Amino acid sequence: MTVDGAQPAAAGWRDAFLVYLQPRVLIVLFLGFSAGLPLALSGSTVQIWLREAGVDLGTIGLLTLVGTPYTLKFLWAPLVDALNVPVLSRLLGRRRGWLVLSQFLLMAAVVFLAFCDPTISPWYVAFGALLVATASATQDIVIDAFRVESLDPTEQPAGQGAYVAAYRIGMLISTAGVLYLVSGFEDAGFAKNAAWTAGYLVMAALVLVGVVTTLLATEPAQAATPPALQAAQARDNPLQRVAHAAYDAFADFLSRDMAFFILTFVVLFKFCDAFAGAMTAPFVIDIGFSRTDYASIVKIGGFAATVAGGILGGLIARAYPLVASVWIGALLQMASNLVFAWQAWIGVNHWALAVSITIENFTGAIGTVIFVVYLSALCQSPLHTATQFALLTALAAFGRIYMSAMTGFVAKAVGWPMFFIISALTAVPSLLLLWWLQQRGHFKSLGPVKAVAPIDD
């Protein structure tokens, strides 16, 4: 099929694959690895370390609060938009200067955490994990802004697909990879805590992947501050520049037509996915699978499906108009929840679980990539990219963290099959809002995000 004399659809798909080899997309891929690496180091991996050291479960549960910087990062995102890093920004540019600073801070935080001893004080470990999470969240702010500003619209879907795949690889290395490393160091004669220290030091060294990538990258052209704004900034002190950046970023977004409905849609889009995902682990164990089954099928099998789904999500978002891509992602997420209702009816069947997990992770990754492409399209001002994107991702996390808090009570009240049916139905409000926004021309105002030879939808 062709559109206005464009190349055949097959050529569009071929171009969609080839865009993954573009230098800017490859840069984003390696930055995705750098972003995914530290998440578990302050989360699930450090929890295993604490538990092996004999720290009680209550304390470990409280330590999950060290992840708070990821939900509050929009509060200091204006710093990234308004201020330059002394020396680094002059040498590398505004975005790359902040990237290198955040990466060196991250490396230092991981090294600090590596030398904490949970047998002496788990709260030192908590402080170290908090430092890692804060540096990691700061790196996320800059990477998001860098990706949005450095990729042109036809590269955004592929960039996000590559980013999600590399992010998951980074997470896998900082979870399973660290555990294998610690076991290897123990086999080599290291004491338990020394083995954990060595494992975390290896992770600190891997942060250099992001540093090298940043140095090889080029500063986004959009990141350059316009001369008129430079003159205005020169008259302001740093505190005034940060305050102006924060005010202007929020005012710019909230002044848009249908701003409240757009923000509500951002909160609701991933809610059905988060609603079911919050109970996946308890569900798998509760219906009779073992912890080994969970690790092998859910984690390893789910990882492969997530990577594949991330790549396909990028291809879909590049090959189709933005509104069609968002509809595809939303409907796939909704339908995948019903697969778990089928799993609850089947019971303990390893092949069925493999199918369920593969479908859920595959479709979830497609939805995530398309959603972030949509968020990127919302950030149209290079002066406020970091702040606005941080705000949007924080709102997107709201459903996952807070609105899903009651899922356990729902599952207990209605049983697993009905729970997953309800989880699918939680997508209905976002679908209605998506239809409403489409009817009012919201997506046309964002501009097309499609291939050079688009496929007619």
Image (spheres, rainbow, N blue to C red):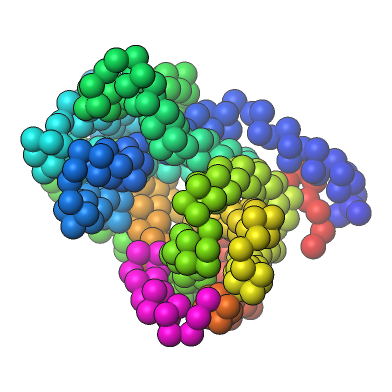
The total of numbered circles placed on residues is: 0
x and y, in percent, of residue 449 in the image: 64, 52
Between 340 and 20, the one nearer to me in the picture: 340
* Residue at position x 47%, y 37% in the image: 172
Q: Can residue 204 be seen in this view?
A: no
Between 66 and 104, the one nearer to me in the picture: 66
Q: Is residue 279 above or below residue 450?
A: below
* Residue at position x 25%, y 44% in the image: 51
Quadrant location of the N terminus? bottom right
Between 122 and 328, the one nearer to me in the picture: 122
Seen from this angle, which residue lies furthest left? 120
Q: Is residue 242 magenta?
A: no
Q: Is residue 7 above or below residue 101?
A: below
x and y, in percent, of residue 71 in the image: 30, 56
**Magenta residues, start to end:** 399-416
x and y, in percent, of residue 92 in the image: 35, 22
* Residue at position x 22%, y 41% in the image: 50
Left or right of 274: which side holds 405? left
Quadrant location of the C terminus? bottom right
* Residue at position x 45%, y 78% in the image: 411
